Structure formats: structure tokens, C-alpha cells
Image (spheres, rainbow, N blue to C red):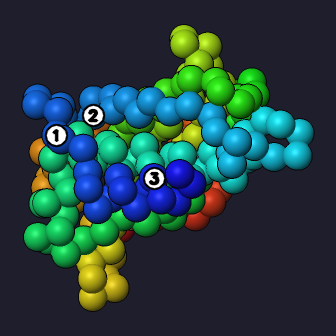
Amino acid sequence: MTRQLQLTLATTRPRRAVPGLGILDVSVTRMRVRPGDLDFYLHVNNGVYLQMMDVARSNLLADLGAVGLLRRARWYPVVAASTMTYRRSLQLGDRFEIRTRVLGWDQRVVYLEQAFLRGEEPVARGLVAGRFLARSGERVPAPEVAALLGGTESPQLPEDLMAWARSVDVAHRGG
């Protein structure tokens, strides 16, 4: 199954919510490297990491019990910006997991960290700034989304994360 099909299934037939999981808790998605994930050099293609992260973010929403809530609100997630750091290669057959967690939010976006681990060995790390849009096309303020998902107040966002958010022009500009 291609990662796009996996994402379609994760979105249209989400896994069951995890009782007690909160918006700031870690969601774990387990995967295995398949032949279609590989590039010419026989390790996972950098673009495939982004597709895997899409699946893991869909699983986070499912784990939070958010899929139905978002459908009723007529809101959907989009990526505003992302960045990756690669430490090790994933190769054919490797089992790994993606640990996805919300780091916090500002008025515009929700910030997530997605860590790829083979066992306990760090493989890659992605930072994602995600927005939510209404079906009308309007942006939904991130605090409204967080509130829908059980969040009350964002934790203090790390300065390095905010420096990145400012550099890619997704951070709230104040005011």
C-alpha cells in the first residue's frame, strides 16, 4: 500500500480514540519501511518522510477523538510549514515509530514535533506548523482548535521553535 493510500485510510477510517489522551500527550504511529518508500540509494526518500508524518498527524487526531469533532465543525488541517533534520537512514524492512506531539500554539498555528525512532535510536525529527481551515476557506484561530481538542492554554513555546516560525513567516505577529 502506498503511503498516500495509508493516509486516505487513516483519515477516512481513523483508528479508535485513546481514552485519556490529552492534546499535549504523545501519539505513537508504528510503521515498517516498504520497497516503495526507498529512493535510488536504497534508503527512505526524504519526501516519503513527509507522507509518513501526514499519516502520523492523522493518527494523532484520531487518538484524541478529534476526527468527528473536526467534521462537525467543518474544519480541516493543513501544513503551513515544516522542517526536517535527518540523523540516520531508514532502510528496507526497518521497523520504526513516529512520536507526534503538540508543542503548543499561538493565534495562527499549532506547532508539532514528529520524532522518528528505530527502537530508541533517533532517526529524524520534523517540526510542523499546522493551520486549520474552515470549509468556507477561512482560517480558524489555533486557540479555537485547541479548545475544541481539550486544550486550555498553550505551554510556553521554545525560543528556537519561535525563531524558526518567524523565519518561515508562520508565527503570530502580535497585536
Q: Which residue is mark 3?
A: 6
Percent position of residue 21, x then y: 18, 31
Nearer the N terminus, badge 2 or badge 1? 1
Give the number of marks. 3
Mark 3: few/some/many CA within 10 Å (<14, 14-19, 20+):
some
Residue marked by disc 1: 17
At label 1, counting other C-alpha atoms closer than 10 Å, the crowd grade (few under 14, some 14-19, many 20 or more) is: some
Mark 3–mark 2 Cα distance, whole angstroms, equals 25 Å
Q: Amino acid at mark 1?
A: Ala
Would you say 162 lies left or right of 168 here? Answer: left
Q: Residue furthest right?
A: 41
Q: CA distance from mark 2 to mark 1?
A: 15 Å
Residue at image mark 2: 24
Q: Residue at x 71, y 30 (%)?
A: 92
Amino acid type, residue under disc 3 in the picture:
Gln
Residue shown at 36% from the left, 64% from the top: 77
Among the two numbered marks 3 and 2 on one chain, the one whose residue lies closer to the N terminus: 3
Q: CA distance from mark 3 to mark 1?
A: 18 Å
Identify the residue at the far bottom of this view. Answer: 136
> Looking at the image, can residue 72 be seen?
yes
| Residue 113 position within the rendered picture, expressed as x and y whole percent measured from the top left | 48, 37
- Evaluate if marks 3 and 2 touch, with contact meaning CB atoms under 8 Å apart: no
Residue at coordinates 44% horizontally, 30% vertically from top-left? 30
Question: Where does the C terminus fall, quadrant-wise?
Answer: bottom left
Please indicate whether residue 33 sits to the left or right of residue 28 in the image: right
